[in-house]
Image: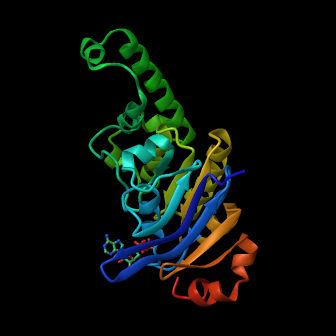
């Protein structure tokens, strides 16, 4: 079976800087994979390449059997890749529920006239979106906060809301950029359980960038380690923890 995502010999240059260099990664359907590495190693650049925010200087990226190089971010979302951001991006002045409802709207089929007249399919679709949004909020323990303004949520809850929004795009592949950043150990533990659960429930493949090693080692089946844009190691959590290159570059370093 072909991998769901395959990046082959990807290079990304910013002026003279090689942010990503000969990057080779594959993700099999249903896997939960970690991408780790020191600050500035190129992890977020990899996400930006997978989502069309950046185009590779050279190399190939295939998703679901087809090249996605040259596609715009919205086209890649439609093909089935959704992401969260290191710096949370929510509609901070809107309610928690509206944040999720907006994310669903990319996928509805009613026409403008129906929307204006609020008839037919529009009202039915709207009701369905509301039900689905509340269901997602429930999964992320946010249902009782549905009518609060997003900016008033505690930080950990905002991170969970971002994941709920990403799922509204009905992705096959979910990219999580430091989902546990700013969370306390108990919130991180709950997040791990949620990530495991949504993978199964939504039949997802998940790639996550994370500095919290207990989370990465606790839930990932395989891990890629980046340093200065290169993959320096790849393996199971146990292999990665015992890899001398990794210990030198990362685990034994500042963090
Ligand atoms: N748009 C850009 N223009 C120029 N340089 C960039 C750009 N985006 C990233 N870089 C550089 O590319 C390198 C990789 O950055 P990237 O943000 O991908 O690292 P990271 O591994 O995600 O780091 P962190 O853990 O700190 O988020 C860094 O040296 C960064 O300064």
Looking at the image, which residue is at 62% across and 44% down? 198
Ligand 1 shown in quarter: bottom left
Residue 149 coordinates in the image, percent (x, y):
32, 41
Report whether 1 appears left or right of 101: right
Q: Relative to 109, say whether 138 is above or below.
A: below
Report whether 37 appears left or right of 100: right
Report whether 41 appears left or right of 195: left
- Residue 180 appears in the picture as rendered: no
Counting every numbered tag in the picture gives: 0
Q: Which of 88/149 is in front?
A: 88
Residue 249 coordinates in the image, percent (x, y):
57, 87
**Residue farthest to the top, as pictured:** 120
Report whether 3 appears left or right of 16: right
Q: Relative to 252, say whether 34 is above or below.
A: above
Looking at the image, which residue is at 47% across and 48% down? 82
Q: Can you tell which quarter of the image residue 200 is in?
A: top right
Looking at the image, which residue is at 32% across and 48% down? 151
Residue 254 coordinates in the image, percent (x, y):
51, 87
Q: Relative to 63, say whether 48 is above or below.
A: below
Q: Which of 34/11 is in front?
A: 11
Q: Which of 160/222 is in front?
A: 222
- Residue 120 appears in the picture as rendered: yes
């Amino acid at each position: 079976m072909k991998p769901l995502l395959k990046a082959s010999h990807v290079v990304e240059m910013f002026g003279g800087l090689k942010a990503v260099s000969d990057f080779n990664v594959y993700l099999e359907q249903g896997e939960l994979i970690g991408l780790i590495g020191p600050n500035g190693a190129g992890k977020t650049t990899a996400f930006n390449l997978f989502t069309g925010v950046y185009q590779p200087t050279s190399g190939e990226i295939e998703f679901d059997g087809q090249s996605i190089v040259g596609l715009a971010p919205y086209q890649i979302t439609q093909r089935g890749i959704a992401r969260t951001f290191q710096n949370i991006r929510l509609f901070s002045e809107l309610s928690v529920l509206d944040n999720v409802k907006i994310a669903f709207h990319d996928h509805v089929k009613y026409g403008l006239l129906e929307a204006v007249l609020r008839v037919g399919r529009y009202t039915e679709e709207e009701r369905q979106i509301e039900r689905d949004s509340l269901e997602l909020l429930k999964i992320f323990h946010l249902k009782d906060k549905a009518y609060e303004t997003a900016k008033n949520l505690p930080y950990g809850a905002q991170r969970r809301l971002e994941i709920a929004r990403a799922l509204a795009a009905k992705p096959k592949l979910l990219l999580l950029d430091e989902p546990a950043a700013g969370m306390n150990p108990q919130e991180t533990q709950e997040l791990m359980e949620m990530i495991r659960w949504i993978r199964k429930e939504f039949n997802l493949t998940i790639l996550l960038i994370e500095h919290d090693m207990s989370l990465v080692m606790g839930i990932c089946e395989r891990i890629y380690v980046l340093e200065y844009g290169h993959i320096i190691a790849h393996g199971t959590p146990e292999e990665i923890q015992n890899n001398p290159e990794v210990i030198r570059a990362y685990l034994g370093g500042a963090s």
